[in-house]
Image (tube, rainbow, N blue to C red):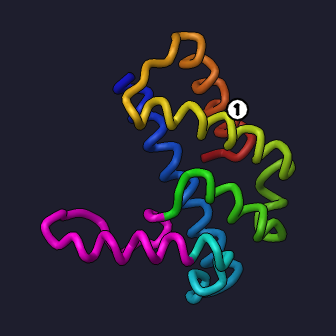
Amino acid sequence: MGRLYAVLHCFENEIRGLIRETLEEKEGADWIEKLPAKVKKYAEDRQQESAADTWLEGEKNDILGFVDFGHLASIMIEKWQFFEDIVPSQHWLKQRMDELEKARHYIAHNRMLLPTEFQRLYMYIADWNRVIGL
């Protein structure tokens, strides 16, 4: 499970990087202000909670670090005009992200997955890397 956790961690942060780079390029330096309002508010609230935890050290400046995995697809769909040349379709994106999110919850909350689920996750990530190229 540890290896799968590391793979999902890297994958999730690669998606955050794709979103960040794409929106910086297409919307400019103030891209954060143009995030979907609900997602932006959620992330800002979590970021403020993190800042209040002064005893807990770690990255607290990256707004995308406070966005839930499920929000990543919604950002890309909301800003589809910037991602439509990268991602095959909104359906393709939503299907893979929904499946990965469900498995991610198991892993993040220390529940065991069967080896067949490992294979599914590796297949989805490999498919993503082949199509998107992360």
Label 1 sits on what residue type? Asp
Left or right side of 42 for 54:
left
Residue 64 lies in the magenta stretch: yes
Camera-side residue of 127 and 38: 38
Give the number of callouts: 1
Residue 113 position within the rendered picture, expressed as x and y whole percent measured from the top left: 49, 18
Q: Residues within 10 Å of mark 1 (few under 14, many from 20)?
A: few
Q: Quadrant of residue 18?
A: bottom right
Whether residue 93 is in magenta: the answer is no
Residue at the image position 55 percent from the left and 77 percent from the top: 41
Residue 4 higher or lower than 118, as above or below: below
Residue at mark 1: 127
Q: Is residue 63 above or below residue 56?
A: below
Q: Position of residue 25 (x, y in %)?
A: 65, 78
Spot occupied by residue 57 in the image (x, y as percentages of width and height):
18, 64
SS for callout 1 = helix
Of 133 and 72, which appears nearest the observer? 72
The image quadrant where one finds the N terminus is top left
Which residues are drawn in magenta?
41-66
Main SS, magenta residues: helix
Q: Is residue 95 left or right of residue 125?
A: right
**Residue in the foreground of this view, choosing between 4 and 74:** 74
Residue 29 location in percent, x, y?
Answer: 56, 87
Residue found farthest to the top: 115
Front residue of 104/79: it is 104
Residue appearing at x 44%, y 75% in the figure: 45
At horizontal 56% and vertical 51% (from top left) the residue drawn is: 69
Left or right: 64, with 127 as reference point: left
Determine the residue positioned at 61% across, 82% down.
31
Q: Quadrant of residue 133?
A: top right
Residue 65 position by quadrant: bottom left
